Amino acid sequence: MEMKGTVANIYRLLAVSFFALVASSAQASSVESMRLWAAPDHARLVFDLSSAANANVFSLDNPARLVIDLDDTQMDTDPSTLPLHDSAITSVRSGLRDGGGLRVVLELNREIEPRHFSLPPNDQYGHRLVVDLEYPGESAVENPIDPIEAMIREQEIQSQRPVAQEQVPGSAAPSTQAQQEPIEVQEARPHPRRDIIIAIDAGHGGEDPGAIGPAGTREKDVVLEISRRLASQVNNTDGFKAVLVRDGDYYLGLRQRTALAREQKADFFVSIHADAFTSPRPQGSSVYALSQRGATSETAQWLADSENRSDLIGGVDGSLSLRDRDQVLRGVLLDLTMTATLNDSLSVGGQVLEQLGRVNRLHKSRVEQAGFMVLKSPDIPSLLIEVGFISNPDEERRLRDPVHQAGLSQAIFGGLREHFERYPPPASLLAWQRDNHRRPSGNEYRIQTGDTLSAIAVRHGVPVNQLRQANDLSGDVIRVGQVLRIPSS
């Protein structure tokens, strides 16, 4: 009996040890894959994990290294297959850490500022550890704006703000005496003849592929090709300069995209996407502008919700509010600026839509509006263009065709150019060319600093509504340097 009891205890101990080992293995995590994307100002390394794992990330010097320790984790992939070119990483090695767990060491070739965070599973990925290597002092775009050109653009913006402020509803109108005071004559300075800057944003990128067509075409690849073609056309046109917000396969947050456009003093922001739907039948191009209220259609709302979720896939805080933009939303000028930029957006959108209709079927015959996060820059007119439905097999094939891509980019730039040739910014080369070929005649007036639409109407003895109608103005927003047609009274 005593022998039987001893044997039973041994079996019981073995069973407990076995189940403890199984439980320990079940709790351990593994690195199933690693992904790396290199951008001009940062690199992002993503660890795809079988389950959540605690991470400790720290730097070492002489030589420069970044160490990533993962508790209770093993490596189930080959780090040597990572594409390290154009990144700050020279090599990657991994091994068991003293005391257990996994240690990954990145050998570095430049100064970095690391940050890391963990992400829970979403619709596209499981548990992830994201390690960002940011390059201090580097620009996020390949060819940043020239400092002198940026200064000219900033001075131009500042010179127009007093005009805007005088048009704030409810503000006191300038006194008649003030309007009649002589303007101090200053020596003329050379015209800046600056380029009009178009920020081109290829949607998605990096770990966010966007929509995927029936044949496996990824939205992020198609829109990058179209964006590059568009940038080439912009840069080959006198008086225009393109800034590619994303010029490679890497991810940028939605807020970062508009922030980059603002840093580069963009005159216009255009975001390129390829639509998708649950059904393969919808097709055609669409143009969207920001809506400060509701969406103009159920499709627009669905699409905005879909695109705004990009930050959740890309690993950005899921709060999509604009509270962190208080520094640019200054007082009552915000409403005025948003109205002006929205009017410009809708105007350009109509011209782009007309041009797109010549090369592709239109899904919507008017500019739609919805609350796209990427369009919420109060000081830059912007559009989101869905070049076609990648979920439609025929359109997916056309979107891969270089000839069709070129046609789409030509149509988009055609609409942009038509707008800016009609309403060039005062300090731009296009404005200088217009001024040297066409001086205001007796029935035209060039707007000066301090002018308001109502004051111009009084000065020329015409009703304000008639002045608006003669110049296709939907409101009272005017710009310094703009030429108004004065209708016969």
Image (cartoon, rainbow, N blue to C red):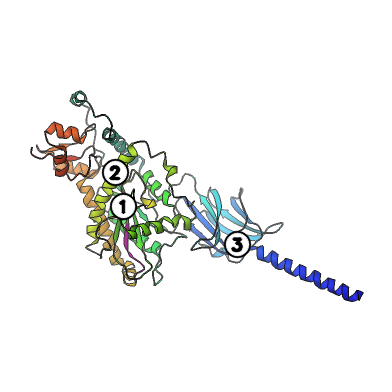
Residue that label 2 marks: 339
Whichever of callouts 2 and 1 sits on the residue coming sooner in the sequence is 1
Residue type indicated by callout 2 = Thr
**Is residue 386 magenta-colored?**
yes
Can residue 362 be seen? yes
Q: Quadrant of residue 54?
A: bottom right
Whichever of callouts 1 and 3 sits on the residue coming sooner in the sequence is 3
Judge depth for marks 3 and 2 and give the one in front. Answer: 2
Q: Tell which residue pokes out farthest to the right in this image.
A: 2
Q: Are marks 1 and 3 in contact (CB under 8 Å)?
A: no
Q: Which residues are magenta?
A: 385-391
Whichever of callouts 3 and 2 sits on the residue coming sooner in the sequence is 3
Residue type indicated by callout 3 = Ser
Q: Nearer the viewer, residue 58 or 172?
A: 172
Whole-number angstrom distance, CA of label 3 to CA of label 2 = 48 Å
> Secondary structure under badge 1?
strand
Image check: 83 left or right of 399?
A: right
Residue that label 1 marks: 289
Residue found 23% across the figure and 37% down from its top: 480
> Secondary structure under badge 3?
loop
Residue found 30% across the figure and 35% down from its top: 161
Label for residue 446?
none
